[in-house]
Amino acid sequence: MGVLGDIEFWAATLRVSTPLLLGAAGAVLCDRSGVMNIAIEGIMLTTALMASAAAAAYHNVWLGVTAAALVGAVSGLLLAYLTVGIKANQVVIGIGLNLVAVGLTSLLFPILCFDANNSIMSSPPFQRWAIPVLSDIPVVGRLLFDQQPLFYIAVVAVLFVYGFLTYTHPGLILKAVGENAKAANSVGINVTMVRYAALVAGSLLMGIAGSYLSLVEVTSFQPNLSGGRGFMALAAVIMGKWHPLGCAAAVLLFGFAEAFQWRLQGMGLPIPAQLPNMLPYVITVLVLAGVVGRANPPGDLGNPFHKEG
Amino acid sequence: MKEGGGTARGGWKPRLAAVGREAVPPVAAVALTILLLAAVMLMVNVSPAKVFGALLQGTFGTRYGFCLMLAYSVPMTLAGLSVAIAIRAGLFTIGAEGQLQIGGLFALIGALVTGNAVIGLVLGILAGGAWGAIAGFLKAWKGINEIITTMMLNFIAMYAVNNAILGPLGRPEASHPCTQEIAAAARLPLMVAGTRLHVGFLFAVAACVLFYLMFRYTAFGFRLRVIGANLQAARYAGTPARLYQFLAMLISGCVAGLAGGTEVLGMRYYLSLNWSRGWGWPGIAIAFLARGSPLAVLPIGIFYGILDAGSVQVQAATGLPSALVQLIQGVPVVLLIVIQTVQQNWMKRVAVRG
């Protein structure tokens, strides 16, 4: 297995994983508060468009990332109003918004991303950040500390969500709301507020994930750019059993499988090329079925909260 | 999901009023969508009259276009029916997409091997059912959320079908990955000669009617509705709830398998990489707009067929991206849920006030 010793292979794994890490960190926040955010796919697609449009128009990638984060947060607010505010069905709203996002982005793409000469405007390239000293470590340094800034942000986001949920009081409150909203309410926690906050924060991270798709992976938007990667992040959350670090590990496995598949295709081996891609999902089903470990979703995941009286 | 009009007793007048109340949200949602769309068109400086004209001309203006539109509506109607059946039994599947892909694959294999459309279609139905049954088993006996399992099974189905096309079923001499075409005898016959309308449309109509009758008039359908309406009560009444949940997912999968099978044997005749256009997703919207009623799935499925088939004409006539029409796939269901929820909250408030 010469592949595994190749630093480029591992670099590809991290590249594929970055948007999924951000998306999964956001989805963990939403899920743990009890709201299933299936709209992640549409949020990532919409924010990818907005990031590209803003970055290309003002020649500034960070403006693109900011725009994507803001649009993500606003989408989260809309989603929260629909699913928490008026308590509409979370999954139907999520799927509906995903369908809307596909149409809306294709409609806005020619308006926002084409210049007067009718050619696509590209955003400036994203510069790597080499962290002094650390990036001089052989192999590992080049792999982990000479990276895209959004990779660092993704790692920080995962660690932040982990620290927040594990060690802080507000994190405990969020988990309580997701586990048993009624009990949380009975001790005076404002369930609605907590869920609003979780959805806005989670969707903001999904927005940054979307910006990675159109600013780092490529330098311009194209219709359907997200290509199911929002759902992939959701799958990783389930495989990681709703634990931030577990989800990150699952994301890396997904990234590994994808990078491996590219290698297989490159080598022209007579192995069905998409077999490695399938495995993470098969493993997830086995995990769910209790064949490998056991996954227990948050107790009140998907249940709207109705205050009595 | 409440039974449409079933609660009203005593004569046709209250019954009609109840049906009317049930019909308000979907009709309002569709009407609002059309208005919203017209507003968007005005904003991007395109005449709404021209767009809707092209849409109607393309789908109702010619015999060929009309038949094409009906053919487009078949997979979406059946996917919608598949989801509606699960909803009726209180299950929330988003697995129609994967089930119809597996159904399409096995229908193709059956048709390629035997050269017989009936065997192909039956194989497709069974394969879709088996795919649904996995999620049904995990839900009923392992207590695992069906939304999550069906999402995973969708991915597995997509990759499995692509692997089959890249691997054993692939045609080595083709420039892009695709399978052999099925023989003429293994194709579904056309309903109208010279058009693309195949008998799959009749199957879709028949399936909607049959499942309506099943839910309304059979003990089996009644029990499915009971476990959907109140699982606890069904258990106390002695209904083997686990078995019925399993069967609901199995049947839902069979109908999605039929969607994939009719599409492959009636429209495509072969499979290429990522062949599905994702009918399973609007299928969820259709099922919800129909509020889980198999009979209502049919007109709404055809409405979605009009949008789908008409979007090509709109693009040709106005230069607008066909996505404008895709936009309408999602908007009505979001509006519907909002209208419904607001209506319910309002009625609750009125009831409290007395």
Image (cartoon, helix red, strand yellow):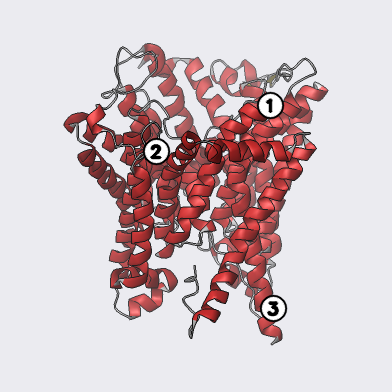
Q: Residue furthest right?
A: A58
Which residue is nearer to you in this view: B124 or A39?
Answer: B124
Residues at discs 1 and 2 in contact (Cβ within 8 Å) = no
The spot of residue A276 in percent (x, y) is: 37, 28
The spot of residue A255 in percent (x, y) is: 48, 29
Query: Where is residue A168, by image quadrant?
Result: bottom right
Amino acid marked by disc 1 = Pro
Amino acid marked by disc 3 = Arg
Which residue is nearer to you in this view: A6 or B45?
Answer: B45
Question: Which mark lies nearer to you, 1 or 2?
Answer: 2
State the residue at coordinates (39%, 38%): B197
Residues under labels 1 and 3: Cα distance? 51 Å
Which element carries disc 3, helix, strand or loop?
A: helix
Query: Where is residue A169, by image quadrant?
Result: bottom right
Residues under labels 2 and 3: Cα distance? 49 Å
Task: Say whether mark 3 and mark 2 are on the same chain.
Answer: yes
Which residue is nearer to you in this view: A204 or B211?
Answer: B211
